[in-house]
Image (cartoon, rainbow, N blue to C red):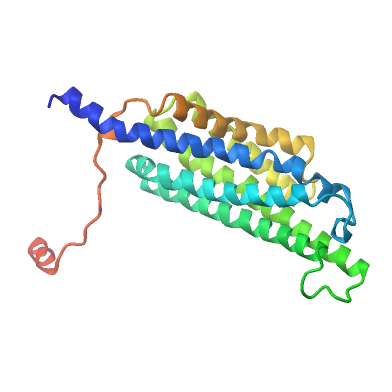
Amino acid sequence: MSATGQNLAAMRPMRRTALLAGLLYLLTFVTSIPTLRLYRPLREHADFVLGAGSAVGVSGGALLETALAVSCVGTAVVLFPVAKRQSERAALGFLAARVVEACLILVGVISLLAVLRLRNGGTGTAGANADSLVTAGHTLVAVYDGTFLLGQSLMPVVSALCLGSVLYRSRLVPRIIPAMGLIGAPLLLASDIAILCGVYPQGTPLAGLAALPIAAWEFALGVWLVVKGFRPSALLLRPEVHATIPDRGSLQQALR
């Protein structure tokens, strides 16, 4: 087989990897954006836990965010072997950030399921007065807001810095795409710190504006990987290096 044929054969699995990663990135958008509207009854009704408003949207949002957590981990698992060829540390950082993000998303989902449990009169709510139920509901919503800030706002900063740096150096995608992530990461980090310090509340237009570059980078990456895939690169043809532990005889011979 010629060198060109070998290169094409080596690139085919990478095309499938790019397609799967792109679809997973787009799935994160499909499963995250609708929740802002689905959780509206929870936000608009202070006595939601007592039965005000519809619970259908909250149940649907919890289901979507569960799928979001799975797709977050999926993007890291699929792209880890590719990122590792450029930088093992960056690849591990990207994987760890996505796993932490998924875990925090699921903690937030659990808090919303607990609100629904209280609303439906779950075990332990018998005899509880309305004020205590409302307080418990607001506490659980506050837990969700905290996990959202740390999970779906802070962790994408780490992901953008790790994966963005790999893609920018390797030129596997047009540099403008990871550049959006690398520029947007410090902006979103500053916004997250401002929210934590009480400069402005979570969910304001300013917070949304700060998150826009990161959202654009992830969406653009997903679209590019689905439509175009990775650019031909020597990085993709480079075999992965697996660390091996030398046996005792090899060590003794090396020390002689």
Q: Is residue 251 left or right of residue 184?
A: left
Residue at image coords 79%, 52%: 55
In the picture shown, does residue 92 fall above or below 50?
above
Q: Is residue 203 left or right of residue 173?
A: right
Q: Is residue 201 left or right of residue 235?
A: right
Indicate the quadrant containing the N terminus: top left, top right, bottom left or bottom right: top left
Q: Nearer the viewer, residue 145 or 195?
A: 145
Q: Position of residue 232 (x, y in %)?
A: 32, 25
Residue at image coords 50%, 39%: 24
Q: Position of residue 152 (x, y in %)?
A: 63, 47
Q: Nearer the viewer, residue 47 or 220?
A: 47
Residue 135 seen in this snapshot: yes
Q: Quadrant of residue 121?
A: bottom right
In the picture shown, does residue 158 fall above or below 251?
above
Q: How many marks on residues? A: 0
Residue at image coords 87%, 50%: 53
Q: Position of residue 82 (x, y in %)?
A: 36, 40
Residue 235 seen in this snapshot: no
Q: Is residue 191 left or right of residue 237?
A: right
Residue at image coords 42%, 24%: 228
Q: Position of residue 192 (x, y in %)?
A: 69, 46
Indicate the quadrant containing the C terminus: top left, top right, bottom left or bottom right: bottom left
